[in-house]
Image (cartoon, helix red, strand yellow):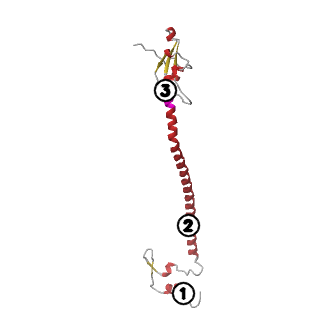
Amino acid sequence: MKTNELNVIKILNSIKGASIKCPSCNEEVSPKSCNLFDSRHPYPSTIKRLLDRQNSAIIKDLKRHSKEEKDLIKRIANAKIKLKKLKEKKVKRPKTVKIITRSINIGQIAEKILPSNKKFDFNPSDCRVLLTPIDYISFNGFSDTGKVEKLSFIEVKSGNARLQSNQSEIKDILESAKNKIKVIKY
């Protein structure tokens, strides 16, 4: 400290009955209890420790916020990818629906006209149309001999179409027919 400077802190500490009002809590305290110091000189150890603790807390907060920011950036990027996929799906969906609808309609028409096709392995006169849940039942041999030699359950499918769950159940029952098929006479 230069010799012509006043040491205000020493002067304040020496005045008996002097008080300082805290700007935070409005409490009046003596200058000595405030641990006043000149910031132009090396800080007292208590102040250094306090500043170090505050600095550490700030660094910890910055790291936490940095991690949260990175996580948020990832989440935003993932959300953008999902949004892009949804937009693409939205564009493709009507085309897919049209193709599926067209296939179903063609399949339903084919079901109805199939017996008239030369490649149909059953005598159309032996066939009875159900269409749901199974398209046809053929009473094989009935139109020629008057006797049913065999029953055939016919389900028409095109492309990669699979049996519906109720059709699969019927197939399973027919394949394991013992004690599952009953003839009831009214």
Type of residue at label 1? Asn
Q: Which residue is drawn at 51% across and 34% down?
A: 100
Q: Which of marks 1 and 3 is nearer the N terminus?
A: 1
Q: What segment is highlighted magenta in the picture? A: 103-111
Which is in the foreground here, disc 3 or disc 2? 3
Cα separation between marks 3 and 2: 74 Å
Q: How crowded is mark 2: few (under 14 residues within 10 Å), some or many (20 or more)?
A: few
Q: Residue 8: within the magenta?
A: no
Give the image quarter of residue 6: bottom right
Residue contact between numbered discs 1 and 3, judged by CB atoms under 8 Å: no
Q: Which residue is drawn at 58% across and 66% down?
A: 59
Relative to 165, say whether 73 is above or below. below
Quadrant (top left, top right, bottom left, bottom right) of the C terminus: top left
Q: Which one is in front, 178 or 16?
A: 178
The residue located at (56%, 56%) in the rendering is 73
Residue underneath mark 3: 109
Where residue 23 appears, x then y in whole percent?
A: 45, 76
Q: Which residue lies furthest to the top in this view?
A: 145
Where is residue 5? Give x, y as percent.
56, 89
Mark 1 lies on residue: 7
